Amino acid sequence: MDYLYILREALVWTVTIFWLYQLMVSLCSLVKIKDKPLKVSKDHRFMAIIPAHNEEAVVGNLIESLKRQNYNKELYDIYVIADNCTDNTAQVAKEAGAIVYERFNSTKKTKGYALDWFLQQKIEENAPYDAFFVFDADNIVDSNFIKNMNKKLCQGEEVVQGYRDIKNPTDSWITAGYAIFYWTMHRFYHLARYNLGLSPLLNGTGFMVRFDVIKPEGGLNTITLTEDIEFSLKRIIKGKRLGWATDAIVYDEQPVGFKQSWSQRSRWTVGHIQCIKEYTKQLAVAAKENKTMMNFDGLLYIVGSIPMFVITIVLLLTNFLMYAGEGITKLELLYNIGLFIVPTFFLPILTGVIVMLLDRRPVKPMLKGLACYPLFMGSWLLINFKCMFVRTEEWEKIEHVRDIKIAEVSDLEKELI
């Protein structure tokens, strides 16, 4: 069993070093960094882009929140891409005040294709915009979103992710799980890396891109189901750091039911697997050639997803084989089970409580969600396992039906406090 012992020790050290690195980086989220100086002082011209597929129930609320921005209304336009719609999304968007582009393509259905189709037209027109935002149709936007993003543009940032909050965190244990997950990622991953000079990642919605950045490639030019992560990795490979704007807030609706959540997270996992195939080698080459922590950290992001999950499974199987061959007492069995259960079930809850306290969020309304959070994260492990063997690369729509306006989100936050 010597070879099993050597394998186990190697895996233990790999997992330990990886998580110690993540812990050290996460601690940098506690350090308040001085704001970057302005390189220019200008009110830039923006376009807000909303890809929407059958979103008549919610797209009007997003347009309303965008029209109420504390920013010069003549300096931004709202565009809705009515993508393969069979409902009244286009009509609702027009009546709400957006400029609507209708797109029909039965083979290329993803958000990435819709964005590139639209952006290619704007590039050909040489449209007079400095930057653009991308939102999902179910979003609603804080009134200072554009103002705060404009500041980032004035500081010299080219690609910036806004703060993606949840507009329905208490609807169910599923939405609570999403909320705690995002709050944790925002502070301990994105903010920590931004403070360190590493690179955060785009989060799918509520982000800004300087228009000149995508002109040479004719758009975002992505091919996977997770166009946000893919575009982020492509920037990191080029040595380009992404920005992070905690005060540019966008509220996102999350699925209430487990079935829709399973479908959505499966799509994200498949997209991650696609990114692993497409970009792991390029990230490794960039880390080797550029020798920067940002490139190395980008590589670790890919390694820390499915590959780290596989390493953990192999480690558990190696332990099982060792004990099966040597025998194990009941006390040793209980000890090893406890060693697995404690971090699996209690660390997610503890992390959730810590991040809510740090962000000054009330814990009491989220108690049920916290209790179920290990189940939420555990189901994600099952999704990862399933997608390693059985997966579909087709886009599947998530229904958005919560008719929540920006004023209602403000009222909800006041109630929670």
Image: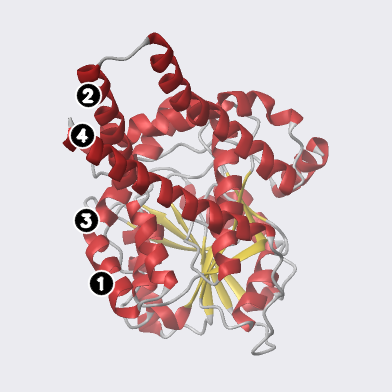
The percent position of residue 158, horizontal first and vertical second, equals 51, 78
Mark sitting earlier along the chain (1/2):
1
User: Front-most of 44 and 343?
Assistant: 343
Q: Nearer the viewer, mark 3 or mark 1?
A: 1
Residue 321 badge: 2
Residue ID for mark 1: 285
Mark 4 residue type: Leu
Residue 277 badge: 3
Mark sitting earlier along the chain (3/1):
3
How far, Cα to Cα, is label 4 from label 3? Answer: 29 Å
The residue shown at (32%, 77%) is 218
Apparent side of residue 261 relative to residue 246 in the rendered image (left or right): left
Mark sitting earlier along the chain (2/3):
3
Q: Are marks 1 and 2 in contact (CB under 8 Å)?
A: no
Q: Residue furthest top?
A: 330
Mark 2 residue type: Leu
Mark sitting earlier along the chain (4/3):
4
User: Front-most of 22 and 169?
Assistant: 22
How far, Cα to Cα, is label 2 from label 3? Answer: 30 Å
Tag 4's secondary structure? helix
How far, Cα to Cα, is label 4 from label 2? Answer: 8 Å
